[in-house]
């Protein structure tokens, strides 16, 4: 009975369970540290964006659509509407 009360003996009996718990804790810590490193890299990349790039990123992330001056001009020049002399598709109609 003296052997069972010996703390070294008890530790030796529970060693596999203790080692398993330590391994699991280390794995969880590695996972958490890896996630934190990824988040820090994203924060650093976001901080490197210009003010306008951040505005666009916010709009894209929220799903909103904002027409910029370039977008309006592109829509005007390349959208449906009155045929222009440079439109190859509509050139036949313009020559008639």
Image (cartoon, grey):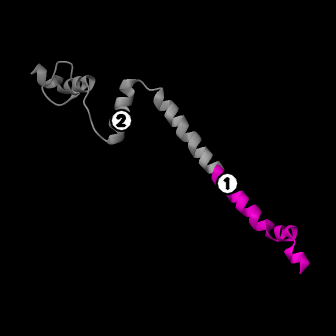
Of the pair 46 and 90, the residue shown nearer to us = 46
From the image, give the main secondary structure of the stretch colored magenta: helix
Of the pair 65 and 39, the residue shown nearer to us = 39
Quarter that holds the C terminus: top left
Binning the other alpha carbons within 10 Å of mark 1 as few (below 14), some (14 to 19) or many (20 upward) gives few
Name the image quarter holding residue 68.
top left
Disc sitting over residue 27 in the figure: 1
State the residue at coordinates (16%, 21%).
Answer: 84
Please, which residue is most extreme toward the left here? 96
Q: Residue tagged by mark 2?
A: 58
Q: Secondary structure at mark 1?
A: helix
Quarter that holds the N terminus: bottom right
Residue 7 is covered by the magenta coloring: yes
Binning the other alpha carbons within 10 Å of mark 2 as few (below 14), some (14 to 19) or many (20 upward) gives few
Q: Which residues are magenta?
A: 1-29
The picture places residue 37, in percent across and down from the top left corner, at 59, 40
The picture places residue 35, in percent across and down from the top left corner, at 57, 45
Of the pair 13 and 78, the residue shown nearer to us = 13
């Amino acid at each position: 009975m003296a052997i069972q009360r010996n703390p070294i003996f008890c530790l030796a009996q529970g060693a596999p369970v203790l080692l398993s718990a330590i391994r699991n804790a280390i794995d969880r810590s590695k996972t958490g540290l890896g996630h934190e490193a990824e988040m820090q890299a994203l924060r650093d990349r976001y901080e490197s964006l210009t003010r306008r790039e951040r505005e666009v990123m916010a709009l894209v992330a929220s799903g909103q659509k904002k027409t910029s001056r370039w977008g309006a001009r592109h829509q005007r020049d390349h959208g449906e509407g009155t045929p222009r002399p440079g439109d190859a598709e509509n050139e036949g109609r313009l020559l008639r």
